[in-house]
Image: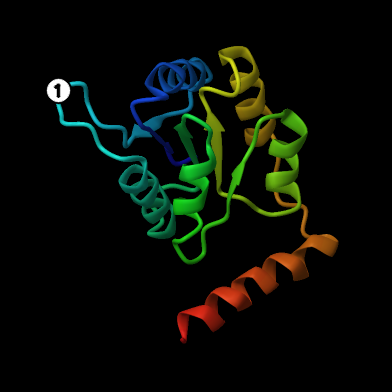
C-alpha cells in the first residue's frame, strides 16, 4: 500500500499526531503534508490542495485531512477534479464514504471529535472498499459533472 497522505492545519496538529501514531502502529506509512513547527503558518486550503493533488497524481491512494471542523478541508479537496473527499464524524459515515462514494479522502474536525473516535473513524474507513453495484453509476455521474464544469 502506498503511504497515506495526511495534512493538518494549526487547529488540528495534535489530533494529526495521534492519527499518524495510530497508522504507524499498524505498519501503515504516512506522508505528512502539514507544515513543520519551524515554518510560518500555512492555511488549510494549501494543505488540502497538496494532499488532493498528490492523490490525483498517483502518489497516494488515500488521504486524511484535519482542521478545526473538517469542513474547509473537504471543500478545498473536492475542488481537485477526480477527488472525492468526505467529512466524517462517525464510523458509519466513514464506511459509506468508501463503500458508496469511493472517497479517497476523509476529513476530520479536531474541534468536533476526540482522539479515540478519530482513530475508530480512520480504522472504519481504511477497512472499507468501494462496493460498486448501485453506487457505481452515481460515482460515474460525479465524474461526468466534473467534465461538464471543466469544459466551461
Name the residue tied to disc 1: 38
Q: Number of numbered discs present?
A: 1
Out of 38 and 10, give the one closest to the viewer: 10
User: Residue 101's spot in the image, x, y percent?
Assistant: 70, 54
Q: Is residue 16 left or right of residue 130?
A: left
User: Residue 4's spot in the image, x, y percent?
Assistant: 45, 37
Q: In which quarter of the view is residue 90 placed? A: top right
Residue at the right extreme, as displayed: 134
Q: Is residue 39 left or right of residue 151?
A: left
Q: Does residue 62 appear anywhere in the picture?
A: no
Out of 87 and 57, give the one closest to the viewer: 87
Residue at the bottom extreme, as displayed: 152
Identify which residue is drawn at 40% across, 31% down. 30
Query: What kind of colouring is applied to the model shown?
Result: rainbow
**42 is higher (above) or lower (below) than 56:** above
Q: Does residue 9 appear anywhere in the picture?
A: yes
**108 is higher (above) or lower (below) than 20:** below
**78 is higher (above) or lower (below) than 123:** below
Q: Is residue 60 left or right of residue 112?
A: left
Identify which residue is drawn at 68% across, 71% down. 140
Amino acid at each position: 500500500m502506498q503511504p497515506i497522505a495526511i495534512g493538518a492545519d494549526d487547529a488540528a496538529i495534535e489530533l494529526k499526531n495521534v492519527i499518524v501514531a495510530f497508522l504507524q502502529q499498524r505498519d501503515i506509512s504516512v506522508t505528512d503534508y502539514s507544515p513543520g513547527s519551524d515554518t510560518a503558518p500555512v492555511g488549510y486550503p494549501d494543505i488540502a490542495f497538496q494532499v488532493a493533488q498528490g492523490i490525483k497524481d498517483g502518489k497516494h491512494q488515500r488521504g486524511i485531512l484535519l482542521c478545526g471542523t473538517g469542513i474547509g478541508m473537504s471543500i478545498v479537496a473536492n475542488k481537485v477534479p477526480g477527488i472525492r473527499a468526505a467529512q466524517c464524524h462517525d464510523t458509519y459515515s466513514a464506511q459509506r464514504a468508501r463503500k458508496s462514494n469511493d472517497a479517497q479522502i476523509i476529513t476530520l474536525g479536531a474541534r468536533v471529535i476526540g482522539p479515540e473516535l478519530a482513530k475508530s473513524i480512520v480504522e472504519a474507513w481504511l477497512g472499507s472498499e468501494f462496493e460498486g453495484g448501485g453506487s457505481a453509476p452515481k460515482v460515474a455521474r460525479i465524474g461526468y459533472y466534473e467534465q461538464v464544469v471543466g469544459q466551461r
